[in-house]
Image (cartoon, rainbow, N blue to C red):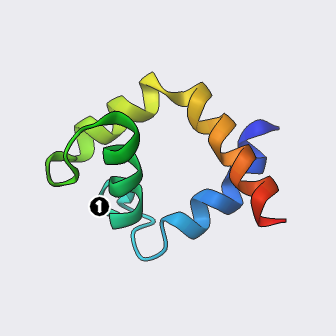
Amino acid sequence: MQLVRAIPFLWRSTRGYRLRPWASPYLRWRIETYWGLHAGEIGKASFLRFVRDHAAELLRFTRWAGRMRR
């Protein structure tokens, strides 16, 4: 259920990059701001590792983003 709530945010934030979200400038900027990894260094492997390691926090963030959008 939590993932279902995250889908609208993920859909909007990956516009133009849905098949390769690690290339999304917006997501790279968010990861750089949150994690401290330089956006230019974020590739597929580091993006997937970030998602794996921070899944609970990302779901919490997407729920918050959904509430703010409403």
Check the image and report above or below for 13 versus 36. Answer: below
The relative height of residue 5 versus residue 1 in the rendered view (above or below) is below
Q: Residue 43 in the image: x percent, y percent?
A: 21, 47
Residue at the farthest top position: 53
Residue 19 vertical placement versus 4 (above, below): below
Q: Residue furthest left?
A: 41
Quarter placement of the N terminus: top right
Question: Which image quarter is the C terminus in?
Answer: bottom right
Give 60 or 44, whichever is nearer the viewer. 60
Name the kind of residue labelled 1 in the image.
Ala
Instruction: Say few, some or many: other residues with alpha carbon within 10 Å of mark 1 (under 14 / 14 to 19 / 20 or more).
Output: some
In the displayed structure image, the side of residue 5 where residue 30 appears, left or right? left
Toward which corner of the image does residue 9 lie, by quadrant?
bottom right
Which residue is located at x 33 percent, y 65 percent?
25
Counting from the top left corner in percent of width and height, residue 8 is at: 70, 62
Q: Residue at x 24, y 37 (%)?
A: 45
Nearest to the observer: residue 13 or residue 21: 13
Question: How many numbered marks appear?
Answer: 1
Quarter holding residue 65: bottom right
Percent across and percent down for residue 34 are: 40, 39
Left or right of 12? Residue 63 is right
Q: Position of residue 4 (x, y in %)?
A: 76, 47
Q: Residue at x 32, y 41 (%)?
A: 47
* Callout 1 secondary element: helix
Which residue position is annotated with label 1? 23
Q: Residue at x 57, y 37 (%)?
A: 58
